């Protein structure tokens, strides 16, 4: 009875860990936990093998998604204001004449004197 209770607790732990997988700091630990349970699934009841197999398939899918790289939405979300400003300033044009105006217009020369 104690072994059956431990098995049910382990499966409940797997199900709860899947809800925390959205956090980057938890992903590796959760995936290792699922892999360990998959490797030791002969210790579980045959009826619980389906849940373990489903969790392992979910981990493989999550890893495949992560290998593709971040989406455009995730890239924009993870950038700081400094990184966005640096990207904007990197695209700005600078006058080759040494004037303040980015286009080298005469207005800036008259204003500066």
Image (spheres, helix red, strand yellow):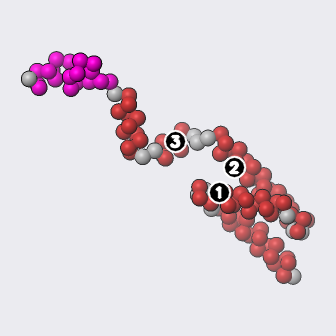
Extreme residue toward the left, this view: 113
Tags 2 and 1 in contact by the CB under 8 Å rule? yes
Which of the two residues, 51 or 31, is positioned nearer the viewer here?
A: 31
* Residue found at x 30% / y 24%: 94
Determine whether 51 is above or below 70 in the image. Answer: below
Tags 3 and 1 in contact by the CB under 8 Å rule? no
Q: Magenta includes 9? A: no
Secondary structure of the residue carrying tag 1 is helix
Magenta region: 93-112
Task: Name which of mark 3 and mark 1 comes first in the sequence.
Answer: 1
Picture quadrant of residue 24: bottom right
Task: Name which of mark 2 and mark 1 comes first in the sequence.
Answer: 1
Structural crowding at the residue carrying mark 2, measured as other residues with C-alpha within 10 Å and reported as few (<14), some (14–19) or many (≥20): some
* Residue found at x 87% / y 82%: 1
Classify residue 110 as left or right of residue 13: left
- Quarter holding the C terminus is top left
Q: Is residue 18 visible?
A: no
Structural crowding at the residue carrying mark 3, measured as other residues with C-alpha within 10 Å and reported as few (<14), some (14–19) or many (≥20): few
Location of residue 96 in the rendering, given as x and y in whole percent from the top left corner? 27, 18
Residue for badge 2: 62
Q: Is residue 60 visible?
A: yes
Q: Magenta includes 96? A: yes
Residue for badge 1: 27
Residue for badge 3: 75
Classify residue 1 as left or right of residue 95: right
Location of residue 111 in the rendering, given as x and y in whole percent from the top left corner? 11, 25
Q: Main secondary structure of the magenta part?
A: loop
**Gap between marks 3 and 2 measured at Cα:** 18 Å
């Amino acid at each position: 009875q104690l072994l059956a209770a431990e098995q049910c607790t382990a499966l409940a732990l797997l199900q709860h860990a899947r809800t925390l997988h959205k956090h980057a700091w938890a992903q590796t630990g959760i995936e290792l936990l699922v892999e360990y349970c998959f490797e030791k699934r002969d210790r579980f009841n045959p009826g619980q093998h389906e849940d373990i197999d489903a969790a392992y398939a979910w981990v493989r899918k999550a890893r495949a998604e992560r290998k593709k790289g971040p989406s455009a939405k995730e890239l924009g979300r993870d950038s700081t204001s400094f990184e966005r400003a640096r990207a904007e300033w990197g695209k700005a044009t600078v006058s080759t004449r040494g004037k303040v105006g980015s286009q080298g217009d005469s207005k800036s020369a008259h204003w500066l004197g």
